Image (cartoon, grey):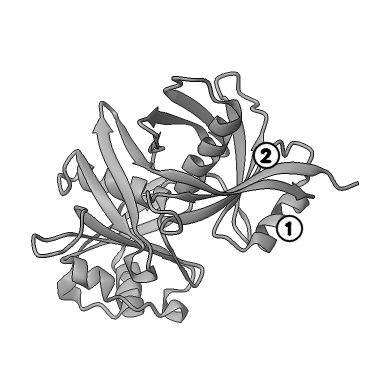
Amino acid sequence: MPIQHAFQQVDVFSAHPLKGNPLAVVCDADDLSDEQMATFANWTNLSETTFLLKPTSPQADYRVRIFTPTGELPFAGHPTLGTCHVWLSRHGKPGQSEVVQECAAGLIKVRVSDGKLAFAAPPLRKSGPVDAKAVAQVAAAFDLSPSVIVDANWTDNGPGWLSVLLKTRADVLNIRPDYAVLKDLKVGVVAPCGSDDDVDADFEVRAFFESVEDPVTGSLNAGIAQWLIGAGIAPASYVASQGTVLGRAGRVSVDKIGDDIWIGGAVTTLIEGTVTL
């Protein structure tokens, strides 16, 4: 028999409602089957839908499962912050400064500070240089001349990201992807913002996968930060802009503190109620 579950739809990585990346969150979902979760995620048709569950680890505050319309992910960034925001709204304690999320990728620490959330970037599952064939495939899919490609690196922390560094923000914004050429690659593109760029950010980022462009992507920004900071290309703290071409105003804060790189942003609840599943 169908059961009602508390439900929220939130906007992640923007202080301006409707300018970030939307996420659907179903609460108290322990009674739902894999098939029910996958079917609902397909129905919402958002880049991700999450399901809040009781943790299995004594170190975790909650467990989350993350679904796209076509499958399940071990980890993703904006679902981590959005789900934590919903959990805090229901179970958080005054003055709570840290939450531990359990997901298929392991335990993820989430900081709570001044109304914003930030997660500690998980270890990269795959890193290092990208082979020339894959770089050529990306260049062809994005119609990029070799002269604008500065470097490429694997930045995979779960979803499978390959990242490409371009010379200028304009190079990033001018991309018009050919998904037939890109095929199954999941590609992030980044470039530094120059002094003439009218934007309150240090880097511009775009994310492409499964024939779509993602508005604002926490996992990709985490992988890019680990790459760029580790290589000395980016400072220990910076702000990334994402979603510009899509009419969004995503802002992702990056801060290296000790051994951790924290990926943060604002989260706003836009829809709250119940869903019957």
Badge 2: residue crowd in 10 Å (few <14, some 14–19, many ≥20): many
Residue 148 lies, with reference to residue 237, above or below; the image says below
Specify the quadrant of the image occupied by residue 132: bottom left
In the displayed orientation, state which residue is furthest to the left. 195
Q: How far across and how far down the image is residue 78, in percent? A: 46, 48
Q: Earlier in the sequence, mark 1 or mark 2?
A: 2
Distance Cα–Cα, label 1 vs label 2:
16 Å
Q: Nearer the viewer, residue 12 or 209?
A: 12
Q: Is 271 displayed left or right of 226 in the figure?
A: right
Q: Is 80 displayed left or right of 221 in the figure?
A: right
Q: Residue at x 51, y 55 (%)?
A: 22
Q: Residue at x 41, y 59 (%)?
A: 19
Could you say whether the residue bearing mark 1 is in a helix, strand or loop?
A: helix
Q: Nearer the viewer, residue 188 or 264?
A: 264
Task: Name the residue carrying label 2.
Answer: 27
Task: Name the residue carrying label 1.
Answer: 39
Could you say whether the residue bearing mark 2 is in a helix, strand or loop?
A: loop
Q: Residue at x 65, y 60 (%)?
A: 44
Looking at the rendered structure, the kind of residue marked 1 is Thr
Looking at the rendered structure, the kind of residue marked 2 is Cys
Q: Nearer the viewer, residue 164 or 37?
A: 37
Q: How many marks?
A: 2
Badge 1: residue crowd in 10 Å (few <14, some 14–19, many ≥20): some
Residue 244 lies, with reference to residue 176, above or below; the image says above
Q: How far across and how far down the image is residue 235, in percent? A: 16, 42
| One can see residue 158 in this view | no
